Image: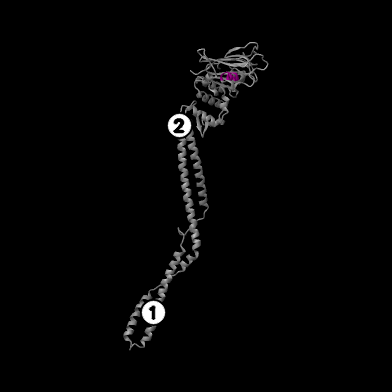
Amino acid sequence: MPIKITQFEAENVKRIKALQLTPAENGLTVIGGRNNQGKTSVLDAIMWALGGDRYRPSQAHREGSVLPPRERLVLSNGVIVERSGKNSDLKVTDAQGKKAGQQLLNSLVEQLALDMPKFMQSTSREKASTLLRVIGLEEQVNALERQEKDLYDQRRTVGQIADQKAKHAKELPEWPGVPLEPISAYDLIQQQQAILARNGENQRKRERAEQLERQRAELAQELAKLQTQYDTICRDCDIAQRDAIDLLDEATDELEASIRDIEATNAKVRTNQDKARAETEAKEYGDQYTALTAQLEAVRQQKANLLQGAKLPLPGLSVEDGELTYLGKPWDCMSGSDQLKVSTAIVRALKPECGFVLLDKLEQMDLETLREFSAWMETEGLQGIATRVSTGGECSIIIEDGCISEAGHPADTADPISWKAGVF
């Protein structure tokens, strides 16, 4: 059974003159009263009794009292805690009547149950870490968080490069109608020289035909004497003429223009190649970005599945981007009542055998929310001792001038007043 506070007595502690309190076993016991009447002193005294010197008030002795502070607290497991004397010496007695010390109390009581503001004032990441520790997933979720961060950073870098590549490719000009590869001036000159060589051969053949024609004219006069020679020359002449008649010279104008424009053309070719490479690189990085996004979503889903399968201290709790959330809202977007509910549930889960928590300043809750909060604590079998600036019916007891006052009647400061606290 979780340990509860069954009885508490205090005298001359901070603003408390004399007080005897029996909290309700489950739900809220609300300590009400006006400001500066000693409400928070009751919680401080309980913290000191159970938490030891780390929670000792800087001015523990009530101002104006000649008697030293005295406290007595009884837990539901039979442990009795007492502080008394000039030095407020601690005396702890277990259920068998054996003496014990602060070490026993530390093993029974969750420190954050005494000091809820410490949890509430921690960072959202610290709260998330506490929750993950409670459900036993801190190491696994932290590993996934690191993996998620690495993938996110990697994807962001790839995305930036992809954007830069795409922008660079878009800014580059593109020339239509040019070859895919740069033109070689050497190849064009070789083609030109080949054509000139063929044209030169044609010219040589023409000159040969002309020469033979002259010879034939000369030999015609000597035809009678040189008939044989004439016939041979005629045959050669016929052959030469047939060779020359179908010859056509090739034009080199286009090649000459290409040679003149080669540098400008190649510049356009290189520009087009640069644009194509830039577009290819942009697409590659875009594909990497898409793949990393899929990996990132897979890690996030794995983390979500891990948390969904965990036994959480409060339905709706989760950890997103390393921060605690409740019903999808981060800590700073939660209502004050939800923050208290979340804190109470997590602190309770830290040490389930500690069945109580101390809550200060519940005036931030309206009456309906306060009733719902108390009903939830009762359902959870959790005892809450809380303060609220109020003297209304929602208060279990009213503190007036350091003592418990019955409703509508000032407290008798000469003797401590015992009040059986109940939940509303």
Residue placed under numbered mark 2 in the picture: 306
Indicate whether 226 appears above or below 44: below
Quadrant of the rendered image containing residue 418: top right
- What residue appears at the point 51 percent right and 44 percent down from the top-left corner? 157
Image label count: 2
Which residue in the rendered view is the most extreme toward the top? 415
Give the number of the disc on residue 50.
none
Q: Position of residue 118 (x, y in %)?
A: 57, 26
> For the residue marked with disc 2, what is the amino acid?
Leu
Indicate how the structure is coloured in the image: one colour
Secondary element type, mark 1: helix
The quarter in which the C terminus is drawn is top right
- What residue appears at the point 39 percent right and 81 percent down from the top-left corner? 211
Secondary element type, mark 2: helix
Q: Position of residue 399 (x, y in %)?
A: 62, 16
Quadrant of the rendered image containing residue 16: top right
Q: Nearer the viewer, residue 317 or 20?
A: 20
Q: Residues within 10 Å of mark 2 (few under 14, many from 20)?
A: few
The magenta-colored residue range is 43-50
Indicate whether 288 appears above or below 52: below
Q: Position of residue 124 (x, y in %)?
A: 55, 31
Give yes or no for residue 376 being in the magenta stretch. Answer: no
Q: Position of residue 43 (x, y in %)?
A: 59, 20
Q: CA distance from mark 2 to mark 1?
A: 99 Å
For the stretch drawn in magenta, what is the main secondary structure? helix
Give the number of the disc on residue 209.
1
- Chain-order first, disc 2 or disc 1: 1
